[in-house]
Amino acid sequence: MARNTLLCCILAVACTLAVASDPAPLQDFCVADPNSQVLVNGVACLDPKLVTADNFSLSGLDMPGNVLNPQGSAIMPATVGQIPGLNTLGISLVRIDYAPWGVVSLHTHPRASEILVVIEGTLLVGFVTSNPNNKLITKVLEKGDVFVFPEGLIHFQQNVGYGNAFSFSSLSSQNPGVVLVPDTVFGSTPLIATDVLAKAFQVDKAIVEQIEAKF
């Protein structure tokens, strides 16, 4: 009997961890109060009496972003930082614009899965599975196509057409976070030791230093 009870407890904990995500709301809404000094896992709630419709709204995602940069892409987020009313709701949105052959470089979202829909253009997208297989799952998408990037996996997008492209992505967190792999590896503060990176990538230290200089 005791053994069965222990097994049930272990299964209950495992199931709880398996469905863990952003905290579920326990009230109608919890509009983020950016001025609060309370430190919580998320953002403290604004007094409901002060909430307005503007706390749940954002304009401007109909306008293309500036893609005149080395990556040839622009990302316009609609997360809890832009829409306070997203606090505790576990969702967010981004618009991504791409110049011809522009890319959103290798990155991960540590707190969210992503579903992308192509609105205009042709995109090459993909993600890489975790160790030990490191399998590349990739596909060319056309207008109206949808693709899913699982939470935490490294992924990318590239415009493989000759005109501008753009897409929308929905993410399963109010604050999904983004870890840009090149920036993280070669542009950390302070820098990762050169000999560590040289051994990791099996290249000369001079090559590592050359790449670091770009970040």
Image (spheres, helix red, strand yellow):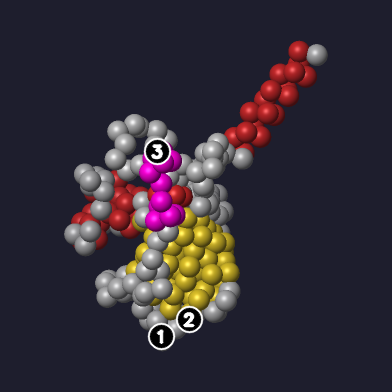
- Label 2 close to label 1 by CB (< 8 Å): yes
Q: Residue at x 80, y 14 (%)?
A: 1
- In 3D space, how far apart are the residues under numbered discs 2 and 1 (Cα atoms)? 7 Å
Q: Is residue 107 left or right of residue 184?
A: right
Q: Amino acid at mark 3?
A: Asp
Q: Amino acid at mark 2?
A: Gly
For marks 2 and 3 on the same chain, the one whose residue lies earlier in the sequence: 3
Secondary-structure class at tag 3: loop
* Label 1 neighbour load within 10 Å: few <14, some 14-19, many 20+: few
- Label 3 close to label 1 by CB (< 8 Å): no
* Label 2 neighbour load within 10 Å: few <14, some 14-19, many 20+: many
For marks 3 and 1 on the same chain, the one whose residue lies earlier in the sequence: 3
Q: Which residue is mark 1?
A: 163
Place of residue 28 in the rendered image (x, y in percent of width and height, measured from the top left): 54, 42
For marks 2 and 1 on the same chain, the one whose residue lies earlier in the sequence: 2
Q: Which residue is mark 3?
A: 47
Secondary-structure class at tag 1: loop
- In 3D space, how far apart are the residues under numbered discs 3 and 1 (Cα atoms)? 47 Å
Q: Which residues are magenta?
A: 45-56
Place of residue 158 in the rendered image (x, y in percent of width and height, measured from the top left): 43, 73
Please tell me whether mark 2 or mark 3 is closer to you in this view. 3
